[in-house]
Image: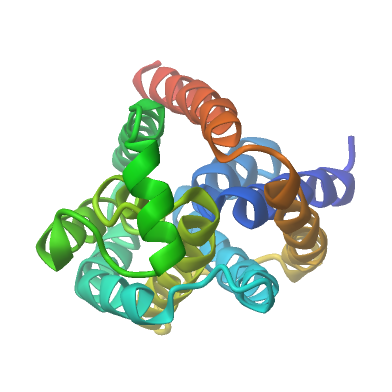
Amino acid sequence: MSALILALVAGAVVGLALGALGGGGSVLAVPALIYLLGFTSAAATTASLVIVTVTSLTALYAHARAGNVRWRAGAAFAAAGLVPAALAGAAAARLPQAVLTVAFAVVAALAALKMLRPGDPAGTAECGRAGRPGRGGSGGADRAAGRGGGFLAVPALVTVLAFEMRAAVGTSLLVITANSLASLATRSGAAVSLDRAVIGPFIATAVLGAWDGKRLAATVSGPRLQRVFAVVLLAVAAFMLADAVT
């Protein structure tokens, strides 16, 4: 299968995940770029940031039109994660490939386990309608953003700030966009060349997938989407860990 077709398919999957779940873009994009398209880890992490930034902006616009973005809480959550995101971006450009692979696998597994944990449906629905933080406050949000960035944004918004799923998805996209831009800023001087013939089609289908994902999120229950995606994340984590240790 040609690199162009693989890029188109992978982009659609990444966009669908971001549009439907408000997270998981890099967790899926990085292994796709490495294992399907032959990118190095350093190039894959940088390329995934470009892809996720553009796609998240598109999905954010779509969710904002539907009223699913809690701007004040999202801005505070994003601000708390900017420094950790920038530090992680700078460190990723200097780490060996095996270390990066293990790190992404661990983050993917943590995100999946967080999504599989049952929440508080009553508190979630009440707080999601009100659009204000619930139990846990900004301190819990700070810790969650520092640990997981975009990958754990949705689980953190649901379990810490008690957002209902659709509001968590929309607000997470604001967090991901801000964190991705911060990470990209730290790589502006890094000597990493990206294949535009692959990245361009990848982004194009990711943007289209993000719109489809937003429509999917409006028709499928949040808990069911979380469970399915959590299983996908665990599978990705297991594959990356196996690859890193063999």
Q: Residue at x 21, y 73 (%)?
A: 80
Question: Based on the displayed image, in which of its 4 quarters is residue 28 positioned?
Answer: top right
**44 vs 10, nearest the viewer:** 10
Using the image, determine if residue 57 lies above or below residue 92. Answer: below
Q: Which quadrant of the figure has residue 68? A: bottom right
Total marks shown come to 0
Q: How is the image coloured?
A: rainbow
Q: Quadrant of the N terminus?
A: top right
User: Between residues 158 and 10, which one lies in front from this camera angle?
Assistant: 158
Q: In percent of the image, x 28 and y 69: which residue is there? A: 90
Tell me where residue 216 appears, x and y as whole percent.
75, 47
Q: Residue at x 52, y 21 (%)?
A: 235
In-image side of 203 versus 108 (left or right): right
In this view of the protein, can residue 2 be seen by the observer?
yes
Give the image location of residue 71, x and y in percent. Answer: 42, 80
Farthest-out residue, left: 139
Residue 35 in the image, given as x and y percentages of width and height: 62, 35
Q: Is residue 129 left or right of residue 83?
A: right
* Left or right of residue 188, residue 229 in this image: right
Percent across and percent down for residue 53 are: 56, 72
Location of residue 41 with respect to 244 vertically, above or below: below
Q: Quadrant of the C terminus?
A: top left
Residue under the image location 75 percent in, 45 percent down:
219
The answer to which quarter of the image holds residue 212 is bottom right
Does the image show residue 154? no
In this orientation, which residue lies closer to the viewer: 245 or 141?
141
